[in-house]
Image: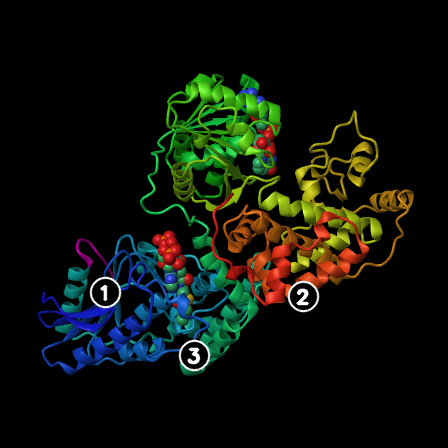
Amino acid sequence: MSNGSELSSMATLQQHGDIAVIMINNPPVNALSLGVREGILEGIKQADADDSIKGIVLACAGRTFIAGADITEFGKPPQSPSLWDAMEAIENATKPVVAAIHGTALGGGLETALVCHYRVCDGAARFGLPEVKLGLLPGAGGTQRLPRVVGVQKALEMVTSGKMIGSAEAAADGLVDQIVDGDLTEGAIAFATKVVEEGKPLVKIRDQNDKVEAARAEPGIFDAFRRKIGRKTRNFEAPEANIQCIEAAVNKPFDEGLAIERELFGKLMSGNQSAAQRYYFFAERQAAKVPDIGRDTPVREIKSVGVLGAGTMGGGISMNFAQAGIPVTIVERDQAALDRGLGVMRKNWERGAKKGRMTMADVDRLMGLITGSLDKNDFADKDLVIEAVFENMDLKRSIFKELDGICKPGAIMASNTSYLDVNEMAAETSRPGDVIGMHFFSPANIMRLLEIVRAEKTSADVLATVLKVAKKINKVAAVAGVCGGFIGNRMLAQRQVEANNIVLEGATPAHIDQVLYDFGFPMGPFAMSDLAGLDIGWDEASSSSSTMREVLCESGRRGQKNGRGYYVYDPETRASSPDPEVEQMIRDFAEKQGIEQRDVSDQEILDRCLLPMVNEGAKILEEKKAIRSSDIDVVWVNGYGWPVYHGGPMFWAELRGLADVKAGLEKYGAGLEGEHWKVSPLLAELAEAGKKFQDLPAQNIE
Ligand code: 3HC
Ligand code: NAI
């Protein structure tokens, strides 16, 4: 093959016999940046004009085929040539164009492959239209071409979930024409040669109507599909717009469908939901970046893990490591607790197997990676030890002292504490640099957030190692500094204080929960308290009816676990309904406290629950307990169900305008008590300067 000539800064044209290879090179993911579009357009033009060329292969250097449009270009003035120009050139080329796909063909990348006349891939290639995750739809013909290839049902699933399919499935669906063994580019050249030699047609998917016509006979499929995904996609705009595009693919001629796709794409792109989701895409990737940690920061090898405590958290934490192939030794204080913990883990995996997510052999293999023990000395050779014992400072301190005597030099010692001071735990050891917080969320085998707590003396390589471990066990990490409740629980506490206040002023728990549910949280604060258990941290002996929670616990209400809390729960279905008795108890309690009941508006509920959270977030930044505001959003979206289409509390506040947020805090703060109404000086400063949290540079945790 020739070395090739440059087509643009991001593509070359190479010649192999009578086949031209347009090779795209735009690391890391070959996004469709300007130089890529220029390269494709120029490459097709040159190959088309050259009589010695009979066929064209479109391939990518590096780790993947095109992974989509360049998201960093969104929201900026468009630069010519557009993706549509490049795609039109491919589809209308006079010679067959074969896409050679490895890695992930995503979004605009898959759409580019769909205008090629043929597609080949390697065995590991994956395909998807993930635009919905960015609050968008495939805006370059994907909604019109995909159903013409894979059928309407499959296309609906792919565009509304954004999930990828593998090469075998793609081949079975007709999305790829051949899976190549061995060198992909060579295989694609051979395929193109065959197409030329056999005089095969230049297939244009736009002209293939069989599958969309077949779906016309079943008009009910769209509403059935809407019902199927309705709960998951509640409040999101993009899934519905994606469905409408596929409906257009079925019911309209190709070009009309394309016009509808373009119009709806434009609407989504200029809306707040997509802005939030695109912001969030980068927020998640930023969160793994720590200013004083670079590529040259050494990392320690983590090949074995110890977990202390096989309770709710210890079990879930251990499952993560086993699933990543890392053996875990889990230590409990007695055999019964250990057996219970191991039993729960097995049952969880078995449930996954029953749902077809793994086989029973997988369950056995995973359980084989877990060793139960009653002896902490078994931690002696472990690279990382995580304690998940009760939330009690004296206990945690004594544990760290003990671990210091057991763990080998260089081992990392971590705490899963929700609120407590990791500095104090570190101070019990002779090696505070090796101590760190790893705050998992419940259920720890499912929730994606890992809040990493960088204590005062945590060394950079320990933090770098834990960030790497987080990625390995498929968690999204965000780094916090030591403060009560770190980022997430510290902000949650502000919301709970205000929700409790509002309930005494006259809004029912169900009303408050409904407002937050409508905003997009999976559940409101009272439903969440019932789920967690009202008696967490409640002590019967010292309970004195001083809070609503105490009053409820004293009356035997423990939450979902005994079917009665702020709500009553149906023993069969676990469905909740408001409890008039509880509402009366609240009114009685308020009267005793001298609090007058009144109507509280939805807007007041929302503002009073959310504005203090933003204020607390600003205080967290001010105290340097978070690196950047978007990390706070990552914590809230991944750990607490903040709806991603609102970006996270800090992004939501910025969209609303920090001046408006400040004014809201001052308005409510004038009549209400509490530190949480005192406007953070940082928030005030930014509001006055017309700036955003995002304008602040990343800072080191202190
Ligand atoms: N545009 C710009 N940058 C992108 C990008 C894109 N489409 N996709 C990834 N990147 C960047 C990331 O921000 C990251 O940058 P960083 O190193 O500076 O943090 C870098 O590429 C590597 O990304 P990841 O860390 O995510 O790498 P992984 O290997 O874990 O994952 C991936 C690779 C699966 C391709 C993942 O990056 C991904 O899902 N990307 C987004 C794909 C996507 O949404 N495509 C659709 C775009 S919208 C579109 O195409 C519209 C069209 O229909 C018109
Ligand atoms: P849990 O009560 O379910 O489990 C704690 C386990 O630790 C028990 O099985 C107990 O037998 C064991 N244990 C206690 N002392 C021990 C010792 N000295 N040696 C060995 N084992 C011992 O508690 P849970 O909920 O798992 O919480 C553990 C930690 O995780 C706490 O610090 C908690 O704050 C934190 N956490 C809890 C979350 C939750 O939602 N439950 C979420 C995030 C963090």
- Kind of residue at disc 2: Asp
Residue 483 is labelled as none
Q: Position of residue 200 (x, y in %)?
A: 19, 74
Q: Nearer the viewer, mark 3 or mark 1?
A: 1
Label 3 CA crowd tier, 10 Å (few <14, some 14–19, many 20+): many
Q: CA distance from mark 2 to mark 1?
A: 50 Å
Q: Is 515 left or right of 346, judged from the image as shown?
A: right
Tell me if label 3 and label 1 are in contact, CB under 8 Å: no
Q: Position of residue 83 (x, y in %)?
A: 35, 75
Q: Nearer the viewer, mark 2 or mark 1?
A: 2
The picture quadrant for ligand 2 comes to top right
Residue at the image position 41 percent from the left and 80 percent from the top: 254
Secondary element at image label 2: helix
Q: CA distance from mark 3 to mark 2?
A: 40 Å
- Kind of residue at disc 1: Ala
Quadrant of the snapshot with the N terminus? bottom left
Q: Which residues are magenta?
A: 178-184
Secondary element at image label 1: strand
Question: Is the residue 268 above or below the residue 571 in the image?
Answer: below
**Of the image marks 2 and 1, the number of the one nearer the N terminus:** 1
The reply to whether residue 505 is visible in this rendering is yes
Q: Badge 2 is on which residue?
A: 660
- Kind of residue at disc 3: Leu
Which residue is more in the foreground, 483 or 89? 483
Secondary element at image label 3: helix
Q: Badge 3 is on which residue?
A: 258
Q: CA distance from mark 3 to mark 1?
A: 26 Å
Residue at the image position 39 percent from the left and 65 percent from the top: 107
Label 2 CA crowd tier, 10 Å (few <14, some 14–19, many 20+): some
Which residue is more in the foreground, 66 or 541? 541
Q: Badge 1 is on which residue?
A: 59
**Of the image marks 3 and 2, the number of the one nearer the N terminus:** 3
